Image (cartoon, helix red, strand yellow):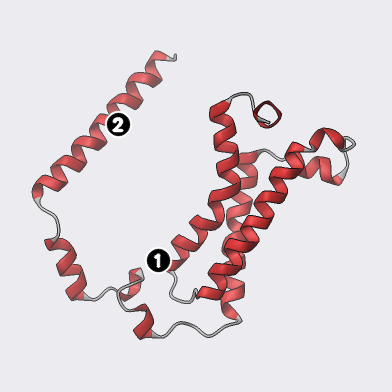
Amino acid sequence: MITRLSDGLYEYLQNVQAYISPPITAVFLLGIFYKRINANGAIATLVGGLIIGFSKLTLEIMKSSFSEGSFLFNLADVNWLVFAAYFFALCVAIAVIVSMFYPAPSAAQLSGLTFGTVTAKQKANNKLSYTIWDIVASVLVVLIVLYIMISFSTLSL
């Protein structure tokens, strides 16, 4: 199966990830940044995303059985990176549209859960939850990752 979908294991894993993660990412980001999203929109996005992602993966596996130039062949032949971008946009649209058909969550339900509903007290508590050593450790990890990325990128030239 790996050889049908990609040239290697890493690309295969990324390919499959492109069919799984867009609905989850759309629901997560909209849940944090958009107060109007509700459970119905989230469930519709996750279920619809599962169906769409599984369908695309199935089409890609069966691509050799379709006649070249046909609609199904062309759909199966769409690059996985391009598909992931369009799939994410579609998942955002599904979440927003379905959520509009149902009542918005109340302010009490959203209190402290979305970016726009965090209270000043919750922000203050969050700032007290970490110290300067946590910040230093985080910066150190980022610097190590950057060093590794730069080192490996210059080696491949």
Residue drawn at x 57%, y 83% is 102
Q: Secondary structure at mark 1?
A: helix
Residue farthest left in this picture: 132
Which residue in the protein does label 2 denote? Answer: 145
Side of 16 where 149 appears, left or right: left
Q: Tell me: residue 56, above or below residue 100.
A: above
Which residue in the protein does label 1 denote? Answer: 32
- State the count of labels: 2
Q: Residues within 10 Å of mark 2 (few under 14, many from 20)?
A: few
| Quadrant position of residue 106 | bottom left
Distance from the alpha carbon under mark 1 to that under mark 2: 27 Å
Side of 74 where 21 appears, left or right: left
Which amino acid type is shown beneath numbered disc 2? Val
Which amino acid type is shown beneath numbered disc 1? Ile
**Residue 15: x, y in percent?**
60, 38
Residue drawn at x 59%, y 64% is 45
The answer to which of 33 and 52 lies nearer the viewer is 52
Q: Secondary structure at mark 2?
A: helix
**Residue 157: x, y in percent?**
44, 14
Q: Tell me: residue 49, above or below residue 62.
A: below
Q: Quadrant of the N terminus?
A: top right
Residue drawn at x 59%, y 24% is 8
Side of 10 where 69 appears, left or right: right
**Residue 29: x, y in percent?**
44, 61
Side of 113 where 42 appears, left or right: right
